[in-house]
Image (spheres, helix red, strand yellow):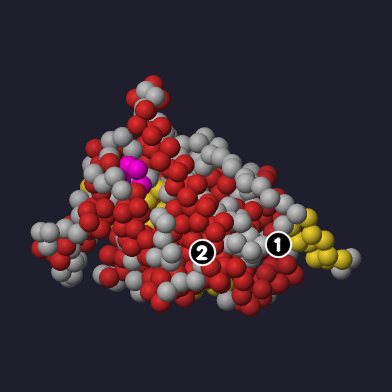
Amino acid sequence: MIHISRVGGNYEFPAELMVVAAMNPCKCGYYPDRNRCRCTLTEINQYQGKLSKPLLDRIDLYVEVEELEYDEISNNNPEREKESEKMRDRVIAAGEMQRKRYQGLPYDFNSELDTEGVYEFCGLNKREAELMEKIFRKMKLSARGYHRMLKVARTIADLDGEKSISEKHLKEAVSYRRNNMLE
Amino acid sequence: MEEKIYDFWFYSLEALGEVQREVLLEQFHTPKEIYDVSIEQIGKIIGFEDWVLKHIYNSRNTIKLQREYDDMQEKGIRFVCCKDQEYPEKLKNIKDMPGGLFVRGALPKMEEKTVAVIGARDCSHYGKFMAGQIGRALAEQGVPLISGMARGVDGYAQMAAIEKGGESFAVLGCGVDICYPRENYELYELLMEHGGILSEYRMGTPAMGKNFPRRNRIISGLADVVIVVEAKKRSGTSITVSYALEQGKEVMAVPGRVTDCLSEGCNYLISQGAYPINSIEEMIEDLGFSYKKIKKNNKNVKNPLESEADLVYAVLDFVPKTIAMIGKEVRENSMEKLNALLFDLEIEDKIEQVTTGYYVRKQ
């Protein structure tokens, strides 16, 4: 849902979508391999700055993709397919868990939780809350980032089939958050 | 006008080199007389081209000079000319010595040994690490660190020295009232308090490419030893090194891997006779100080049973690695576990991510 509040009035635009996007780290694409990447830091910042930070802040999962080895491209590994199947089962199970949890509520999935929803369903125990505080300070999270990270942690816990968010879920959620020293 | 202002005018004239200044002084004795003499009379002297004369002529604007001088005073910028007592003795020995220096903050004390740390702007993490190590080590020994406040090695070394409580001086290729590059603003402010910002260019002179090679002679000139941290074979750093050699300064270089293009310059210098920096302790001793600190790393060596976190830490260096690469090296397949270990190390400030998902060791 997109809310726009201006002097002229308030508008709500229903929106529900998943964005999957890919980009290069710099214009030559080799950064941070400094032997091949000869881009200056300014150039890299310029390149990455094409996407505004508030926009990037709304992206929940960041994954770096490495170069593939020859074997990995040339062989179709059947083991991998099995891994994917297993993952799919976990995803379905996690989705089911969320549907059950949110029965009778205006949400279907963790991603749809609003602020109150986050407080209610992504609550942390004492140890986890202390860790979250450390993370918040260290990563200089925005309010949005904080809420989004909790939702991601909730989802990771769901994938593990666990009731409450534990430290390891938070730690994994951190690894998916954009963390850029360049800025 | 006050005599100081005549000095300021004369010794900051960009069109005049050291030799021309001497010729003029011989003929007309004082800056004031040179200011007042007709331009035709100066034109009679051999070796003064028209553009130089024009430059001198145009610069004689009493109102403007007075205003600029007052402005400097207001901003706390001093002009130290080469006949002043304060003028660094070491600069008097270099070729084409600057007529004077604009100073914000202090000037390095010349009885002390000073070291310049220079290197690539786009340095690697290894360069950043070594710049920091050297900067801190010099600060611990109380050695003033001279550099150019540039992005990369220069800035990292100066920042590290100041953070360790040391003194550092930046020689700029623009006016001292201009912070170039802008991203080093924090360092610029700190330098004013913990050292100084120097330039031979007048206030308001923008950062121009042509001025930077020339200012490098002042960087090497102010130092007794020039340390090169990382440099490509042909770079601004090599200009400073050639000035240093011409001025008879000692040059030291941080060796690097043969395959790293950012170490090519340093390795080449070493092959040409520069001192290699094999360790920080050795460097300090080579500089003529006794290394006071006891090795810190003993603790880690003592413990034979390395924890998993130590293992992960050990495979990280200054070449950014992804979690998958780390996993392969420590033979750990569980991403979850690796993630938690990396997280712990990061929150303890032992490692950092250079860009999302790429980890390097932090000092």
- What residue is drawn where x is 32% and y is 42%? B325
**Dot 1, crowdedness within 10 Å: few (<14), some or many (≥20)?**
some
> How many marks can you see?
2
Quadrant of the image containing the C terminus of chain B: bottom left
Q: Nearer the viewer, residue A12 or B93?
A: A12
- What residue is drawn where x is 33% and y is 38%? B260
- Magenta stretch, overall SS: helix
Q: Which residues are magenta?
A: B323-327
- What residue is drawn where x is 44% and y is 53%? A159
Q: Is there CB contact under 8 Å for labels 1 and 2?
A: no
Q: Position of residue A141 (x, y in %)?
A: 53, 65
**Dot 2, crowdedness within 10 Å: few (<14), some or many (≥20)?**
many
Mark 1 vs mark 2: tell me if same chain: no
Q: Position of residue B14 (x, y in %)?
A: 59, 54
Residue at the farthest right position: A8
**Residue A30 left/right relative to B351:** right
> SS of the residue at dot 1?
loop
Q: Is residue B114 visible?
A: no
Tell me if residue B324 is in the magenta stretch. Answer: yes
- At label 1, which amino acid type do we have? Arg
Query: Circle 2 is placed at which residue position?
Result: A150
Q: Position of residue B176 (x, y in %)?
A: 56, 64
- What residue is drawn where x is 80% and y is 65%? A5
Q: Nearer the viewer, residue A180 or A149?
A: A149
Q: Is residue A44 visible?
A: yes
Please give the chain letter of the residue carrying mark 1: B
Tell me if residue A118 is in the magenta stretch. Answer: no
Q: Is residue B62 above or below residue B255?
A: below
Query: Circle 1 is placed at which residue position?
Result: B60
Please give the chain letter of the residue carrying mark 2: A
Where on the picture, by quarter, is residue A115?
bottom right
